[in-house]
Every structure is written in structure tokens, then in C-alpha cells.
Amino acid sequence: MLNIVLFGPPGAGKGTQAAKLIEKYQLVHISTGDLFRMHIKEQTELGKRVKDLLDNGILVPDSVTIDMLEEEVQKNPDAKGIIFDGFPRTVPQAEALDAFLSSKNSGIKTVLQLDVNEEELKRRIAERRKISGRADDDQDKLVKRIDEYFNKTVHVLPYYQGQNKLTVVNGIGQIEDIFGQLCSSIDTE
Ligand code: AMP
């Protein structure tokens, strides 16, 4: 299976690049942020539990996130591969994902990090907010989300570096150029 983790801070272009990668490699896209938003919209029990956290840009507890993720993977038994977008965000999540995939005789093939500096992120999110209407794209919440990324999520990178699976791609530039770099990294793996 071609399982890929797409990694990067809010506003790095993960959604845009994920859409292109899915089309090219025929992969299933699993975005934990999208799943949480769907639960909130549908007012499920899970949605009610996580709404305040999402509205405030705070990470959902690992156990809740991991359970939801595993359930979503189980729904796609015939997938050629999965793009994990927004997951894992903590080392325990990364460890849980490895354990879960290896129980299915599978694993993560590569981790692609979209590298974008904080200045550019803030500019992009301000733009996105105009069209997305996402409550957590609000300026204060954004600072919190970026903090969560730099305080907690970046610690996942050494975990994958240690496994020799990490590729860093400059996330600033033309969408097609960035996509080309991601593809060549996948193809050479
Ligand atoms: P995203 O759309 O990926 O930026 O995620 C939006 C929000 O969903 C985050 O700010 C968190 O509150 C929550 N979330 C998404 N993925 C995770 C995750 N892997 N672990 C914890 N919380 C998450």
C-alpha cells in the first residue's frame, strides 16, 4: 500500500496538494480535521465533544483522534493507499498509526513535509478565511493553531526522521512545482 503522511502547519497547502496526489496515485484521503468538522456539522456525540477544541484551535486528545482515524481506515479495506492529512500530530499518534498499520501488514511509506514559514502562513490563512468561513481561521485562533503545530506537532518529525522516512519540500512556490517535487519524492521511494 502507498500510505503517505502529508505533514505541515495550517495553511501550508496540504489540502491542495492532497487533492492532486489522490487523483494521480488513486489514493484515499483521510483528513482528521475534515472528519471532526463533519461530526460537528452532523452534531454527533463526537462532534459535540470536540467542537470547543476545534473552535479554539486546540488539539483533540490522542485517544479520541486515534479511535476516529482507525475507524476511518477500516472503512477503506480495498484502498491502494491512504494519504493521512493532519494526522499524526503527536508522537503517540504516530506510534499508534505504526502499530495499527503493522497489524494489517502495512506501514507508512513516506512522510512529506511542506515547509512554510510563519509569516507566509499568516498571510495565506487571512486569505483563506475570506472564503472558507472556518471559525478557526480567525486571527487569534490561528495563532493558537500555529502554536500547537510548533509546540506539539513538530515533535513528530524526528520520529519519522529516525525511520528515514521524512522528505522536506519547500511549500512556497507554484502549486505545480511543489506537486512535482512531492511526486518525484514518492516515485523514488
Ligand atoms: P486541520 O483541518 O487539520 O487544521 O484540523 C482542524 C482542527 O481539528 C485542529 O485545530 C484540531 O483541533 C483538530 N485536529 C485535527 N487533526 C487532529 C489530530 N491529528 N490530533 C488532534 N487534533 C486534531
Image (spheres, rainbow, N blue to C red):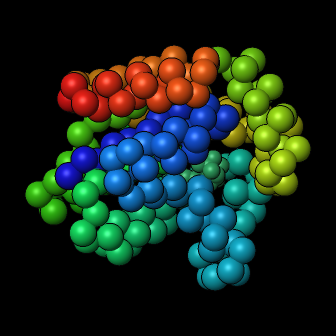
Q: Residue 36: horizontal and vertical position, in percent?
A: 60, 65
Nearest the eye: 186 or 134: 186
Q: Residue 47: horizontal and vertical position, in percent?
A: 65, 74
Asked whether residue 187 appears in the rendered view, the answer is yes
Q: Residue at x 58, y 28 (%)?
A: 175
- When the figure is inspected, residue 28 is found, relative to residue 93, above or below; the finding is below
Image quadrant where residue 112 sits: top left
Nearest the eye: 189 or 36: 189
- When the figure is inspected, residue 24 is found, relative to residue 79, above or below; the finding is above
- When the figure is inspected, residue 20 is found, relative to residue 155, above or below; the finding is below
Left or right: 96 as drawn, with respect to 62: left
Image quadrant where residue 12 sits: top right
User: In the orientation shown, which residue stands out farthest toward the left?
Assistant: 105
Q: Residue at x 63, y 74 (%)?
A: 39
Q: Residue 184: horizontal and vertical position, in percent?
A: 32, 24
Asked whether residue 49 appears in the rendered view, the answer is no
Nearest the eye: 33 or 146: 33
- Numbered marks: total: 0
Q: Residue at x 80, y 51 (%)?
A: 132
Q: Residue 167: horizontal and vertical position, in percent?
A: 35, 23
Q: Quadrant of the C terminus?
A: top left
Left or right: 57 as drawn, with respect to 182: right
- When the figure is inspected, residue 6 is found, relative to residue 104, above or below; the finding is above
Q: Residue at x 48, y 61 (%)?
A: 65
Image quadrant where residue 41 sits: bottom right
Left or right: 98 as drawn, with respect to 126: left
